[in-house]
Amino acid sequence: MTSEILRCLCASGQLGHGIPRPAFERGIALNPHFIGADCGSTDIGPYYLGAGKCDGHADVIRRDLEMVLLAGRKLNVPVILGSAGSAGGEPHLQLTLDVLYEIAARHRLSFRLAVIHAEVDKGYVLEKIAAGKSRPCGPLHELTPDGVERATRIVGQMGMEPFLRALDAGADVIVAGRACDAAVFAAYPVWKGRDKGLAMHMGKIIECSSLSAEPGGRDAIMASLDATGFTLESMNPARRCTPYSVAAHSLYEQPDPFEVVEPGGRLDMTRSVYTPVDERRTRVTGSVWETNPVYTIKLEGVERVGYRYFSLGAMRCPVATRQTRAILDHVEKMVGELLVSDFDPKDYRLKFRAYGVDGAMGAGETEAANPLEVMVVTDVIGRTPEIAQAVCSVARYNLLHYFYDGIKATGGNLAVPFVPADVSGGEAYEFSIYHLVEVDDPCELFPMDVIQIKEGRPHD
């Protein structure tokens, strides 16, 4: 059995943002042994986890999920989805399941569904803190009971073991909450007896679909895995998986291109070899999995920090753009002085983001520039929506009419593209928990429901 080549198809780097159909259909025509798709990430920020919403429109999620589900049932192969609904909490899982049930009913599908939950009870986390079994994931603060209580929602990032349990239960379709991206794709090959190091490296690459190709894109990608390595091929003929493009993908979201730390261990790529098969395919060998003596799960939690309002405005005057940061610092000080009698400074946070100067890097910017124009984002988070809107309005107005050094006229300094100029960003969240907890069982945080769907209807 282990000599069989497993064809592993990744349908999408994030389901719900549009699966290119031609490439997906080419992959389906090659009869994959399973179809996988990652559905979420922390890349999208803390808002979706806190608000319980999806990063994607319902119609596109429905389109993508229907493509994947129908293909899986046609081929009678497992469909494996991780980080459902963008952030993988209970509301995200339920939103995904609602769409799935709708599709199953419309097409009268029958299959065995495994639902793996990932939202974590606060009491469990408090017990881990009390037992000394929690620690920061990186250079962060220690996890405290007060921080846990303030969290709006906490999820755990599951490894492959909950997926293996679902496959053992005979699941045709797996919909999982927050999950390690690579585990979504590595679980089936490991379940079939393949080497874990090769499976995890394969999963780490293909979870981004064709991003590891030249030119990179969102098309489906196929990995053909055997006992000693795997071969990568984008399902879009215009994209080439070269040794350079595949090896370069090791830097994706990683500080070290030779190591990836995952639930339960680490992927060692120091001996990985990338060999061209032809102009469009590359083979990878030599990757090794090292198991940790203590299994840890990463927790991700957010807390609400207020309500956001923002405004956009472009600065074009060369006299102004040469002194953008000084202008913004002065206006920020002015706003604080104007509002000191109306609002407690602790009730709001004002930040100017100057794109073209240091908008992306902030204080970490190392390159000085003399831009033609600068886009200023006035970003305010307030204790209430009313405070946020008031501060944003005052900040925008004073920036618009700030009398900077060398000004030639008394007109407005900003080209404001939209009216109303101050836009609500809704609730604002921050990641407050990004910590590891030690577990006795890799599945203990992730309860599973197995549901039989018969002609589109759930049955006990």
Image (cartoon, rainbow, N blue to C red):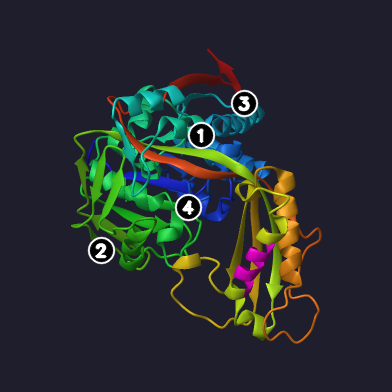
In this figure, which residue is indicated by the disc labeled 1? 151
Of 160 and 46, nearer the camera is 46
Residue lying furthest top: 460
- Distance between mark 4 and mark 1 Cα atoms: 36 Å
Disc 3 versus disc 4: nearer the observer: 4
Residue 460 magenta: no
- Distance between mark 3 and mark 1 Cα atoms: 40 Å
Rendered position, 239 above or below 229 = below
Q: Local crowd at mark 2 within 10 Å, few (<14), some, or many (≥20)? A: some
In this figure, which residue is indicated by the disc labeled 4? 220
* Extent of the magenta region: 327-335
Kind of residue at disc 1: Ala
Of 293 and 233, nearer the camera is 293
Which label's residue is closer to the chain start, 3 or 1?
A: 3
Which label's residue is closer to the chain start, 3 or 4?
A: 3
Where residue 108 is drawn, which disc sits there? 3
Instruction: Give SS at disc 3.
Output: loop
Where residue 275 is drawn, which disc sits there? 2
Kind of residue at disc 3: Arg
The N terminus sits in image quarter: top left
Q: Are the residues flagged by discs 4 and 1 in contact, CB closer than 8 Å?
A: no
Where residue 330 is drawn, which disc sits there? none
Disc 3 versus disc 1: nearer the observer: 1
- Residue 39 visible from this viewpoint: no
